[in-house]
C-alpha cells in the first residue's frame, strides 16, 4: 500500500471511529435527556398534587372563620332568625363545599326551639317535605327542619358540649350517609358554664362531588401552562374510592399524589380541640398525564430529538461514504494514471527501438540484398506509422479530455478503411501466426465518417486482439449491412473479459485484471478513444465475451441514405 493510500485509509478510519464515538455519545445524552425529562414530569406532577391539596385545605378551613364566626352570637342565643338568615343568605354561596348549615338555641323556660337547617342550594322556601309543620316565621327565613338529622346532631352536641370547647368536629353517619360535622358552641357569657346555643354545618362526599369538585380544572393552575403536557386529576376518599375526576382514570397509572385532611378546620389548631377530636380522614389528590405514564411520555417527548439526531447521523454517514468513495475513485485514478505513464513509455519505446535497430543495420551496409533491405524499410515504415498512431492517440486523448477533438466527416468506403487498418498490422499478424478471416461485402459500404478516427478505432481493436490472444491466435473481421446500419464484428479467441469488467473497459485508464497480469504495459485508453470515435459517428460499440474463450467487439455505424437498399452480401477471404 502506498504511503498516500495508507494515510487516506488512516484518516478514514479515524473519521469512522470519531463518528461512531460521536454517535454513541449523542445517543447517551439523548437517554440522559429522557431521564431528565422523566424527572421534570414527575416533579411537575408532584408539584401539581401538592398545590391542589394545599388549595383544597385552604378552601376547607375557611367557612369556620369566614362564616360561622361572622354570625352574630346574640342573634343565635336570642333565636333571631332574621339576622342569621341574612348572613347565611349573603355569605353561604361563597362556600359551595358546605351542604347544610344549622342553628339551635336554648329556649326560655316552657318553650322549645327546634334545630333549624339552612341550605344554600335550596334556601328558597317551598320544600314542602322539609318545611311542613314549621312555624311560618322559620320558613320565611329560609330555614327548614329535618327531624332524623336534627336528632343525631342534638345527640352529638349533648355529648360534646359539657367539655366546654368552642368547636367540636365529628364524622357522623346518618341514614347510611357519612357527614363531616363542625359545631360551634355558644356558652353562657359570664361563667361559660351553660350551653346557650350552637351553630354549625355539615357536608358529605356526594355534595362535594356535585358542588365543589365538579369543576376540578379551577384547582389546577399549572395545567394552563401550554408547554406542559395536559394533566388528569382525581380525588379519592379515605377508602380509596374516587370522589371526582377530571380526565383519564388514575386508579392504576398515575404520576404523583398528595394527601389532605377531609376536615373543615385549620389542622394547625386541631390540637386545641382535644379531646373533641376525631381521627382525621385523609383524602388523596392524584395527578397523572393525559397522554399516559411518565416513561412513555418522556420517551414521546424526546422522540423528536431522536429523529433529528438520526437524520444528522444519516447525513454524516452519507457524507463520509461519498467522501470515501470520491477518495477511492481519486486514488484509483491516480494509480491508473501512473500505470498509464509507465505503459505509454514502454509502448513508445518498443517501435522506436525497432526503428533504430533496422536503421542502424541498413546504415552499416550489411544488408546486401535489395529484397531484404526493402523488408527492413517496410518494418521501419510500419513501426514509424505505429508510433505516429500512438502519438496521435495520446494527442487525441488529451483533446478528448479537454473536449477539443473534432472528427470532420466525409463520404468514404468503410470496406477500404477496414482493409487499410488491417494492412497496418499485417506484419504483426503474420509474425504472430494469426489465423485471419475477413468477411466484407463485394460492393462499397458508404458511410459519412472521419477516416483517421475510424482507423484509430479499428487499430485499437485489432491491437487488443494481438495483445490479448496468447495461444489461440485467431481474428475474424466481418462487415455487413442491415436496416440502415453497417455492422463490423471483430472476433478473437483470446483471454476474454469477465462480465464484471465488460462495462468498465470502456472507461479511461481502466485495464482488466487478466490484461494486467499478461501485458503489464498498456495505457487503458484504447477503448475509451474507440468509444469516443463511435459516439462522434452516432454509432454504438459493444462487446460479447466469455472468459477463456474469446471476445467479439461490435461496431455499428449509420449508413449513408443512398446505400440503404444495399443488403449484406458477404465475400470471404483470408
Ligand atoms: P489497454 O489495452 O491498454 O489495457 P484498452 O482500453 O484498449 O487498454 O482496453 C481496456 C481493457 O479491456 C484491457 O486492459 C483488457 O482488460 C480489455 N480488453 C480489450 N480488448 C480485449 C480483448 N480483445 N480481449 C480481452 N480483453 C480485452
Image (cartoon, grey):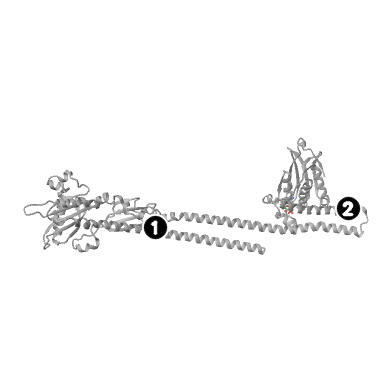
Asked whether mark 1 and ligand 1 are closer than 8 Å, the reply comes as no
Q: Is residue 329 visible?
A: yes
- Residue 93 in the image, given as x and y percentages of width and height: 23, 50
Mark 1 Cα within 10 Å, few/some/many (few <14, many 20+)? many
Point 85% across, 53% down: residue = 381
Q: Is residue 511 above or below residue 140?
A: below
Numbered disc 1: secondary structure: helix
Q: Which mark is residue 381?
A: none
Q: Residue at x 77, y 58 (%)?
A: 345
Residue found at the very far left of the displayed protein = 110
Task: Give the number of callouts.
Answer: 2
In the picture as drawn, the residue positioned furthest to the top comes out as 565
Q: Position of residue 534 (x, y in %)?
A: 73, 46
- Residue receiving disc 2: 375
Seen from the viewer's position, the closer of residues 522 and 331 is 331
Mark 1 lies on residue: 41
Amino acid at each position: 500500500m502506498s504511503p498516500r493510500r495508507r494515510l487516506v485509509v488512516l484518516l478514514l478510519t479515524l473519521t469512522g471511529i470519531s463518528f461512531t464515538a460521536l454517535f454513541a455519545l449523542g445517543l447517551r445524552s439523548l437517554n440522559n435527556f429522557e431521564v431528565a425529562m422523566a424527572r421534570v414530569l414527575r416533579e411537575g406532577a408532584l408539584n401539581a398534587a401538592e398545590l391542589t391539596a394545599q388549595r383544597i385545605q385552604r378552601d376547607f378551613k375557611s367557612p369556620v372563620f369566614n362564616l360561622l364566626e361572622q354570625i352574630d352570637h346574640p342573634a343565635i342565643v336570642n333565636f333571631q332568625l332574621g339576622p342569621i338568615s341574612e348572613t347565611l343568605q349573603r355569605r353561604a354561596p361563597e362556600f359551595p363545599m358546605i351542604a347544610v348549615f344549622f342553628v339551635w338555641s336554648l329556649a326560655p323556660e316552657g318553650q322549645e326551639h327546634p334545630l333549624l337547617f339552612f341550605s344554600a342550594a335550596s334556601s328558597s322556601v317551598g320544600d314542602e317535605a322539609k318545611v311542613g309543620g314549621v312555624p311560618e316565621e322559620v320558613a320565611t327565613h329560609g330555614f327548614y327542619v329535618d327531624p332524623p338529622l336534627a336528632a343525631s346532631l342534638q345527640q352529638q352536641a349533648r355529648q360534646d358540649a359539657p367539655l366546654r370547647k368552642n368547636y367540636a368536629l365529628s364524622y357522623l353517619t346518618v341514614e347510611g350517609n357519612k357527614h363531616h360535622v363542625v359545631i360551634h358552641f355558644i356558652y353562657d357569657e359570664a361563667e361559660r358554664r351553660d350551653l346557650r346555643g350552637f351553630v354549625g354545618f355539615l357536608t358529605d362526599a356526594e355534595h362535594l362531588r356535585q358542588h365543589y369538585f365538579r369543576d376540578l380544572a379551577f384547582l389546577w393552575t399549572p395545567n394552563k401552562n401550554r408547554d406542559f403536557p395536559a394533566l388528569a386529576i382525581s380525588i379519592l376518599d379515605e377508602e380509596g374510592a374516587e370522589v371526582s375526576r377530571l380526565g383519564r382514570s388514575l386508579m392504576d397509572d398515575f404520576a404523583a399524589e398528595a394527601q389532605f385532611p377531609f376536615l373543615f378546620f385549620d389542622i394547625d389548631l386541631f390540637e386545641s380541640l382535644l379531646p373533641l377530636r376525631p381521627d382525621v380522614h385523609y383524602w388523596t389528590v392524584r395527578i397523572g398525564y393525559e397522554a399516559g405514564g411518565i416513561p412513555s411520555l418522556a420517551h414521546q417527548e424526546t422522540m423528536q430529538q431522536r429523529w433529528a439526531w438520526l437524520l444528522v447521523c444519516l447525513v454524516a454517514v452519507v457524507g463520509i461514504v461519498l467522501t470515501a468513495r470520491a477518495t477511492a475513485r481519486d486514488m484509483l485514478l491516480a494509480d491508473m494514471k501512473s500505470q498509464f505513464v509507465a505503459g505509454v513509455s514502454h509502448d513508445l519505446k518498443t517501435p522506436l527501438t525497432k526503428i533504430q535497430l533496422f536503421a542502424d543495420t541498413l546504415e552499416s551496409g550489411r544488408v546486401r540484398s535489395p529484397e531484404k533491405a526493402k523488408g527492413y524499410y517496410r518494418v521501419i515504415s510500419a513501426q514509424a506509422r505505429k508510433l505516429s498512431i500512438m502519438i496521435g492517440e495520446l494527442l487525441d486523448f488529451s483533446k478528448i479530455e479537454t473536449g477539443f477533438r473534432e472528427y470532420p466527416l466525409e463520404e468514404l468506403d468503410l470496406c477500404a478503411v477496414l482493409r487499410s487498418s488491417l494492412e497496418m498490422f499485417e506484419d504483426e499478424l503474420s509474425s504472430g501466426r494469426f489465423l485471419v478471416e475477413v468477411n466484407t461485402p463485394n460492393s462499397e459500404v458508404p458511410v459519412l465518417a472521419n477516416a483517421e478516427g475510424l482507423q484509430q478505432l479499428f487499430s485499437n481493436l485489432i491491437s487488443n486482439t494481438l495483445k490479448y490472444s496468447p495461444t489461440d491466435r485467431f481474428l475474424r473481421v466481418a462487415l455487413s449491412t442491415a436496416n440502415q446500419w453497417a455492422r463490423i464484428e471483430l472476433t478473437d479467441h483470446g483471454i476474454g473479459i469477465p462480465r464484471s469488467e465488460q462495462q468498465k473497459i470502456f472507461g479511461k485508464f481502466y485495464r482488466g485484471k487478466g490484461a494486467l497480469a499478461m501485458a503489464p504495459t498498456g495505457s487503458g485508453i484504447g477503448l475509451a478513444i474507440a468509444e469516443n470515435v463511435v459516439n462522434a459517428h452516432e454509432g454504438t460499440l459493444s462487446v460479447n465475451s466469455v472468459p477463456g474463450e474469446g471476445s467479439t467487439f461490435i461496431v455499428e455505424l449509420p449508413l449513408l441514405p443512398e446505400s440503404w437498399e444495399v443488403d449484406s452480401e458477404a465475400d470471404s477471404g483470408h
